[in-house]
Amino acid sequence: MMTESTSSITWPQRVFGWLVHLFTASGAVFGLAAVYALHQEKFILAFWFMGFAILVDSADGVLARLAQVEVTAPQIDGALMDNLLDYFNYVMVPAFFLLVSDLLPANYWAFVGAGAIVLASAFQFSQTQAKTEDHFFTGFPSYWNIVVFYLFLWQLSPGVNLAIIILLAIMVFVPIKYAYPSRPDYLFRSHWPRVAFVLASILWGVAAAGLLWLYPVTSRFWIAYSVGYCVFYALFGIYRTLVPLKL
């Protein structure tokens, strides 16, 4: 039986709601394409598909709120779909990347590193306080695709890479806040710092795409900005853990 609120929804609004869900679901296709590219050892192409998946994930929340999908397409649990796709794209795809590349030590150590990622992230995705009431992630938010991207660019020794993976897997369980880039209203009191944070996040994406486009040639400017943003992101999370914003 239709309620008064749902009966007033027009068919264009319903179509928009379903299209937003379809847009979210397209992240699974990009993830599958990344896995296939990895199977063929086309690592740069895999990164491009992983980047498209990040782009979808970055935009679908804003579109979902704009389309009011809870009302216009309530048959689909958008939050559940988003979590399923995030675990696949942010965890399983980069874990597979580590297994088929030479970023980790040979033999069983590569499986140890990849296994640490999928195990820690399984707990991170299923904990009841994975996101705080003020829309921060709690613990390292399984940005493993981004981690693998930097390990690929830096070309550190496999042993160092494994140590970084294990450290970040442990950080999943350390209750430090990490900002939710698409919810800047919970980061600062003032409007302009929120705008600046969003623009800085978009510019980080541009920097990552630029580094990928230039590879194997590199750019010191884009590397400096990209790493600088990540350092600021981590330090800001620690700051907001110690000094929560009172709205």
Image: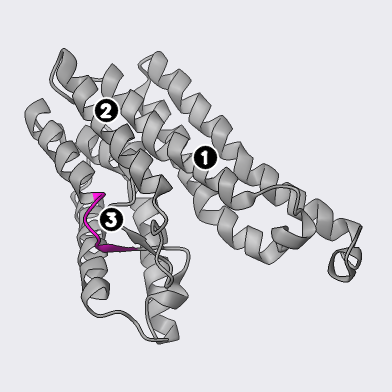
Residue 141 against residue 67 in the figure, above or below: above
* Residue 222 in the image, given as x and y percentages of width and height: 26, 52
Using the image as rendered, state which of residue 32 and residue 226 is in the foreground: 32
Q: Which mark is residue 139?
A: 3
Q: Quadrant of the C terminus?
A: bottom left
Above or below: residue 58 compared with residue 90: below
The magenta region covers 172-178
Crowdedness of circle 3 by 10 Å Cα count: few (<14), some, many (20+)?
many
Q: By what rule are the colours in the image chosen?
A: one colour
Question: Residue 112's spot in the image, x, y percent?
Answer: 20, 25
* 54 shown above or below 4: above
Instruction: From the image, tell me which residue sits under label 2.
Output: 114
The Cα atoms of the two marked residues, 3 and 2, are separated by 19 Å
Q: Can residue 21 be seen?
A: yes
Residue picked out by circle 1:
84
Q: Residue at x 22, y 40 (%)?
A: 218
The reply to whether discs 2 and 1 touch (Cβ–Cβ < 8 Å) is: no
Q: Above or below — where is 14 with respect to 152?
A: below
